[in-house]
Image (cartoon, rainbow, N blue to C red):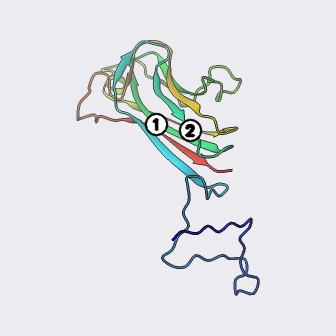
Amino acid sequence: MTSTLSVSKIQGLSTAAAPTTVEIASGHKLTGAAGAMAIAGGIVNATQFTNATTFASTSTNDDIFDETITPKLSGSKFLILFECKLSRTTNNSLYLQLGIDNVYTLYGRDGTNPSATCSWYLESYGSSHLSNASYQAYIGNYLYSHTGSDTWNLKIRTKSQGGTAYLNYAYSYDDGARGRPISTCTVLEIAQ
């Protein structure tokens, strides 16, 4: 037998020992559809994307992640956390950019050349093992305020000065001795 209780407000009984508390009996729980019980500041959805592919590219921009996000609630904030593993040829800079709906000006002091991560530049010297036998973790985060409940697009891409960028491996050594990493992007939807 199923029944429906319709109320506009729930509050503790004024004569109870703790009148501002509504208690759920031990062993019982409240449930609902996704987002039905959202508390401001609470996480209503967590999604992690992974990229285990490898590439070697001489392009200025290559997408590492290109994801469509569907909000559970209207007006949420989204905490975007990412860590991408790349190596590159010497004597050229590389950093990553974060784009939301193809807008890449979220970072940057003056709205130009926005960088969502540190920039790595490795000079050629000696055996160049710092560049060709290792990869770097490009780590970034951003708190995005979304209006409405429409889907939106998230992209994380390379911004290369030149040379060749390599995703998920040390470019001269894709082997067990250096590890075979993956790149990740986690998106947490936060109710407002």
Name the residue beneath numbered marker 1.
Answer: 83
Q: Quadrant of residue 174 in the image?
A: top left
Q: Quadrant of residue 4 in the image?
A: bottom right
Q: Position of residue 67 (x, y in %)?
A: 50, 31
Q: Position of residue 78 (x, y in %)?
A: 60, 42
Of helix, strand and loop, which one carries label 1? strand
Find out whether the residues at labels 2 and 1 contact each other: C-beta distance under 8 Å: no
Residues 86 and 1: in front is 1
| Residue 189 seen | yes
Residue plotted at (56% across, 38% down): 70
Label located before the other in sequence (2 or 1)? 2
Residues 157 and 33: in front is 33
Question: Circle 2: is it few (<14), some (14-19), or many (20+) Cα within 10 Å?
Answer: few
Residues 77 and 73: in front is 73
Name the residue beneath numbered marker 2.
Answer: 70
Q: Position of residue 103 (x, y in %)?
A: 63, 24
